[in-house]
Amino acid sequence: MLDQLARPLLFSLDPETAHDFAISALHAAGRVLPAGQAIAGESVELMGLRFPNRIGLAAGLDKNGEAIDGLARLGFGFLEIGTITPRPQPGNPRPRMFRLPEVQGIINRMGFNNHGVEALVANVRGAKYKGILGINIGKNFDTPIDKAADDYLICLDKVYSLASYIAINISSPNTQNLRQLQGESELDDLLGRLKQRQHELTEQHGRYVPLTLKIAPDLEPAQVVNIADALRRHRIDAVIATNTTISRDRVSGVRYADQQGGLSGAPLFEASTEVVRELCKALAGELPVIAAGGVLSGRDAAAKLEAGASLVQLYSGMIYRGPTLVSECVRACSRGTAPTS
């Protein structure tokens, strides 16, 4: 009921102002309320981690880890924060987020705006949350693409001891040339260097932290197969499919559809689910797929599992449906069957 009353107020604000307000409110709630617990659902073991339910928060909502404890009270089985970069950066000029309510979509061109990895580390250290925490890492906008691996390695070093898993974001459309890292040779080099550092950090910390790769929906079938091959070859622990899309096929003629940036929400559902399906076929169960993109109902979440995913993440759907979407998706995914390896 409370979220139904709050939503009209939030939608009366500029989208980014509403986002900042929500993060501040969640931060405050996390400071004064007891620690939250995941909604009881179908638990699953993946990447050596036990997830209490299959529904998680996608990266992008809490870039700096400022609202971890507040978000934990919504019942997610896991949280993913970030994307974080080595140095603080403001991101792209405002306005840079647009609602498309007619189609339950969002366009953003935020550009990895964040306070830098050191600020995120401090926030994580100060949180009460003891559940599964993914930390999503990226590169600074002014780091040349041929030096991108250096930024990922810096972030990997900084967050390794605090993360349950680390997500490598090479698929945002809002950092110039970032998606080039999905190319065969570029991806091979990046994953090789990250996997080597993971091995070194495992020895250093006495703890193995899984690596996941977050990919785009705007891929040809042959590219999906190449990425699957690279994931297997480098023994990456999981893949997140997908980030936002640059396609406007499903929003043609809708207000703000011509804005530059990544499109998320309902218009992304079919494309992202098809990538999940293609990935699962190419991977043949060798590593799990975490599905994200266009989940606005329990039925949508269950469809991701039916396509082969093991876990499902929410973000844009929360904007349109509110926190009740979490419990709805947990229930829907507890009734279905999905791979657990």
Image: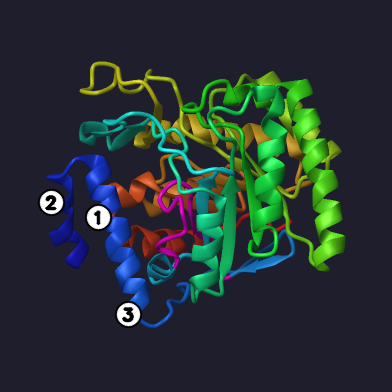
Residue 8 bears which disc, if any?
2
Q: Is residue 333 visible?
A: yes
Q: Answer few, some or many: residues within 10 Å of disc 2's Cα (few below 14, many 20 plus, some between 14 and 19).
A: few
Q: CA distance from mark 2 to mark 3?
A: 25 Å
Amino acid at circle 3: Val
Q: Looking at the image, which residue is at 36% across and 32% down?
A: 108
The answer to if 124 sits in the magenta stretch is no
The residue that mark 1 highlights is 21
Residues drawn in magenta = 52-68
Q: Looking at the image, which residue is at 50% across and 56% down?
A: 119
Please report whichever mark, 1 or 3, sits nearer to the chain's N-terminal start. Answer: 1
Q: Looking at the image, which residue is at 30% across and 70% down?
A: 28
Q: Looking at the image, which residue is at 83% across and 60% down?
A: 202
Quarter of the image where one finds residue 151 = top right
Q: Position of residue 130 (x, y in %)?
A: 56, 75
Q: CA distance from mark 2 to mark 1?
A: 14 Å
Q: Position of residue 106 (x, y in %)?
A: 32, 35
Q: Secondary structure at mark 1?
A: helix
Q: Secondary structure at mark 3?
A: helix
Q: Is residue 296 visible?
A: no
In this view, the residue in front, 117 or 321, is 117
Q: What colour scheme has been applied to the protein in the rendered image?
A: rainbow
Amino acid at circle 2: Pro
In this view, the residue in front, 255 or 163, is 163
Please report whichever mark, 2 or 1, sits nearer to the chain's N-terminal start. Answer: 2
The residue that mark 3 highlights is 32
Amino acid at circle 1: Phe
Question: Would you say the residues marked 2 and 1 are in contact, meaning their CB atoms lie under 8 Å apart?
Answer: no
Quarter of the image where one finds residue 109 = top left
Q: Position of residue 336 (x, y in %)?
A: 54, 58
Chief secondary structure of the magenta portion: loop
